[in-house]
Amino acid sequence: MLFDDRRAFATLVEQHQPTIRRFFLHQTMGDEMLSDDLAQETFIKLYYSIKQFKGLANLSTYLYRIAYNVLQDHLRRNRFTHTTDIIPECVISTHNDTHIDITRALQQLTPTERAAITLYYIDDRKVEDVASILQLPAGTVKSHLSRARNKIADFLKNNGYE
């Protein structure tokens, strides 16, 4: 069983690490080092909590829930309520202008809106999964998605995109 099988756990990490890391990259506005640290913390927490996993949700949903909790802990520790920091230099130096504009558009969102929009559109999760991960009612998730889409559209429109 996965609980006591390190090889099985290593396989689980290999399978899910790219998506969890990508989730954190979107939440941290491209900060690779921070994303790696948060992803590592997520898998450590998964390792110690896997025995509590009851299979009521998909394992990937459970993993994203842990990742979201790790993100919330990080934001609380660093007293971030809204990520409006300057885009990390690594993003500016390695990506084209369109990517920078989308990154800046994502910066306009609250952390919850950004998590909802990336889980739904980028990670292709269903509204019900996003609601479970964020521990919000599905209707609230739909509201966050709608507000996030409007904010992104307004930002892009105000910056020369049609």
Image: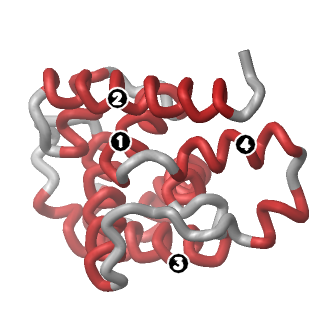
Residue 88: x and y, percent? 70, 70
Within-10-Å neighbours for mark 3: few <14, some 14–19, many 20+: few
Position of 153 with respect to 33 (left or right) is left
- Please state the horizontal and vertical placement of residue 8, each as a whole percent of the image: 44, 58
- Distance from Cα at disc 1 to Cα at disc 3: 22 Å
Q: Real-space Cα distance between discs 1 and 4? A: 17 Å
| Residue shown at 76% from the left, 48% from the top | 100
In terms of sequence position, does the residue under pointer 4 or pointer 2 come before the other? 4
**Label 4: which secondary element:** helix
Q: Locate residue 27, reporting x and y percent.
A: 49, 56
Q: Which residue is mark 1?
A: 113
Residue flagged by tag 1: what amino acid is it? Answer: Glu
Q: Which mark is residue 51?
A: none
- Which residue is outermost to the top? 162
User: Are the two marked residues, 2 and 1, in contact with CB atoms closer than 8 angstroms?
Assistant: yes
Question: Label 2: which residue?
Answer: 147
Q: Which residue is mark 4?
A: 101
Question: Could you give the CA–CA distance between mark 2 and mark 1, rounded to whole angstroms?
Answer: 8 Å
Mark 3 near mark 2, Cβ–Cβ under 8 Å? no
Asked if residue 77 is positioned above or below residue 125 in the image, the reply reads below
Q: Position of residue 72 (x, y in %)?
A: 28, 66
Dot 3 or dot 2: first in sequence order is 3
Please state which amino acid type lies under the numbered disc 2.
Arg
Of residues 33 and 90, the one drawn nearer to the viewer in this rendering: 90
